[in-house]
Amino acid sequence: MLRFLFIFFFTGLACIQHVSGQRTTPKKPAVKQSAVSKPAVQKVPAPAVIQDTLIKKAELDTTAVPEGGLTEKEADELAEKAAKTAKDTIDAYKIKIEDISYLSVCPGTTVHIPFTTEGPFDDENTYIAHLIDASGKSIAISLPGKKSPLKAVIPSYKIGGEVYHLQVVSNISVIKSQLVPIRLLQTPVARIEVIDGTQAARIMPGQEAHLKVNLSGTAPWSFQLSDSSNVLNTMSNPHYLIVKPTQIKAYKIMGVSNACGSGTMSGEAIVNVDNNPEPKLELKETDKIARVCNNIPFQVPFSATGKFNKGNRFVVQIADRTGAFKNLSTPDSSGYISTQIPETYKPGEYRLRVTSSAPYLVSQVAKVTIVSPTTTILQKDSLFLNEDQTGELTVAFNGGGPPWFVLLSDGTYENNIQESPYKVKVKPYYDTNYQITSAGGLCGVGKFSGRAKVAVKTPPVAIILEKLSQNMVCSGATLEIPYKTVGRYNPGNKFVVQVTDKNGRFVDLPTTITPTTMNVKLTSATSSDTIRTHKIRIISSSPAVSSAVEEIDIIAPNKAVGEVSGKGIITAGRSTRIQLKFKNGLPPWSFTLSDGTAINGTFLNPYLISVTPGATTEYKLTSVKSGCGTGTGKGSAIITVEN
């Protein structure tokens, strides 16, 4: 229906124009067209408005409507043209945020967002910066501005560490820039506690207590303790402290800060100082010794607080399922004991504890598992892969994990493997025999074995000479030859383009090679008197293969001949035509006549040209050029002018 209304409307306009055309001055349509066309370019608020304006312009441009009205096809074409023009106009508007990857800002801070624009934006147009969160919610963070950069404020309630994007939006027309990621820094959080994770420690006078401060947010951090000591710009997390109070004392964090300002604090560590505290012995962080290996040293974390007698010794003991504990370490007085499991202990579950001798104390018992060294087997697979295809080899692990790791003989490496059997992806270039170079798990490098073979099927080597860009060229010119290769060529292989000489023998041509084309210069070896058909091919050296042979016509250089002819009698002020014929050379031809008339690049042969001499004139060719260079002219045309 819209199409027919469109036709009817334009037909009516054509009739009105036909009636009113006799009394309309020539300047009036130009004024109307200018008045309509100006808004269509300068003030375009939206695609729909652009299209409406262009249609109105077409309605007033009565020269576009033929007498008798528009056909249905013409109406469709005009509507499509208007829509395309509107789309092209909108596509010309662009906003681009410049590089701000260097920005790392805190919530609540001010940033300057530089941007560039393309297109005829309205003089009253303004730009606003928006911040978009991970859910796609967008909020304006700047006042409207007319130029770059925009001054924006990151809302203080935004959470540091989350993903956000910046975008600049205009209002006339509504154009959006690309999304640019921005990283918000996190405010600091600090919590203090005793090094073993508890809130209290007991020491004797003169002893040290070990505390730790757990930090979060963006490093570096600075904080102050309740004893007025300061730690500035630490990168360590957690940060460990050593204190040596002379009496009971509670330690708190009074303030913490980073690049984003002050943060929040929590926790309290109480250090009790006792002249004669009751001795106490307990294991700490038992999860660190939940799995151990034979002959690999490990440290047993325990704490001994209180007053132990002179000559006291600590010993690590182990017991199997029978319950009989045996000494695992040598006696030590330091409180930091390292030991290892002898090879005589078989893999399985055991119990571990620490004892003291003066006084005799026993810590709680921790369950430990002795794991065996890893045994890794590469299963005997035989894979057949096509060129550039990826295959999978199966590796089975036993003991000492997870996690496991494996290194294959071709350099393929996988670590943090959590399952067995495990598929290792390989992509060999040639037939390859695989074996394991190294493999293991929790207990380090273990035992490994197995082999697998992967065969790679490659297509036979071939050179494909594709369709030439032109089948007729000049000697001495450079020709682009498209090609493809199939299969694998040996290192050091060279491709060369060959063409037959005048005796029919293939000769090499200077060849410049790219991944998709070869550019060759047609040398004098291919020259002939006029034009000759030659054969052309591509060959390789390793392996030695040849492409199919194609034919190409090669024209001798500088041999284009133009002949002018014609004879006529005309009266003064009249015109007539003379004829030019070309042979040899490669079109297009260019020529200059003796009267100065010049034609640059014609494919017409013969070529007719109109002349209007004021007196009897003989026309000759003063120059002839073609795709093969400068040629020669001959003949003449005589036009006699009678008064």
Image: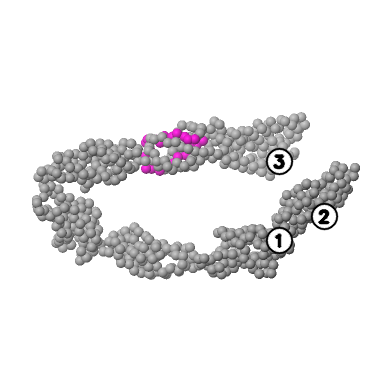
Name the mark nearer the viewer: 1 or 3.
Answer: 1
Q: Say which quadrant the N terminus sits in.
A: top right
Q: Quadrant of residue 628?
A: bottom right
Look at the image and tell me whether residue 379 can be seen: no
Q: What span is in magenta?
A: 148-170
* Mark 2 and mark 1: Cα distance apart in space: 23 Å
Image spot of residue 12 (x, y percent): 71, 35
- Which amino acid type is shown beneath numbered disc 2? Gly
Which residue in the protein does label 3 denote? 70
Between 621 and 226, the residue placed more toward the observer is 621
Q: Is residue 618 left or right of residue 165?
A: right
Give the amino acid type for the residue marked by disc 1 in the picture. Answer: Ile
Residue at horizontal 20 percent and vertical 66 percent from the top: 344
In 3D space, how far apart are the residues under numbered discs 2 and 3 (Cα atoms)?
53 Å
x, y (%) of residue 370? 23, 61
Residue 384, compared with residue 126, is above or below; it is: below
Q: Secondary structure at mark 2?
A: strand
Say which residue label 1 marks.
Answer: 555
Residue at the spot 52% in from the left edge and 34% down from the top edge: 171
Secondary structure of the residue carrying tag 3 is loop
Instruction: Count up the numbered dots.
Output: 3
